[in-house]
Amino acid sequence: MSQTGYSKYETGENDIPTKILINLAYYYNTSIDYLLGITDVQKPYARSKDFDLQDL
């Protein structure tokens, strides 16, 4: 990803696609709520047995 594209996500000029948010939350072992600043709790939610990242 280019620096310009990343910067647009950081500044809110572009919205981060849901698929990217899910992958970032899994990568950083946190919740999307934490990534978006909705909560200060870093611990991720329990994951659904039926959810598979490969399905995204």
Image (cartoon, rainbow, N blue to C red):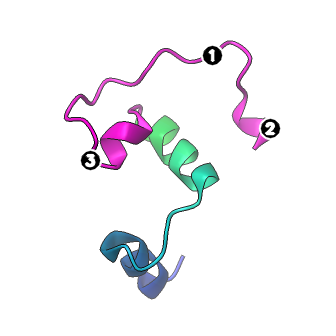
- Secondary structure under tag 3 reads loop
Q: Tell whether 41 sits left or right of 45.
A: left
Q: Position of residue 32 (x, y in %)?
A: 43, 40
Asked if residue 52 is among those painted magenta in the image, a careful observer would answer yes
Q: Nearer the viewer, mark 2 or mark 3?
A: 3
The percent coordinates of residue 26 (x first, y second) are 51, 36
Residues at badges 2 and 3 in contact (C-beta under 8 Å)?
Answer: no
Upstream in the sequence, badge 2 or badge 3?
3
Residue under the point 48% across and 76% down: 14
Report the disc number at residue 37: 3
Sequence-first disc among 2 and 1: 1
Q: Is residue 8 above or below residue 29?
A: below
Which amino acid type is marked by label 1? Ser
Indicate the quadrant where residue 52 lies: top right
The residue at 31%/23% (across/down) is 43
Residue on which the image places disc 2: 55
Q: Along the horizontal axis of the image, is 33 left or right of 38?
A: right
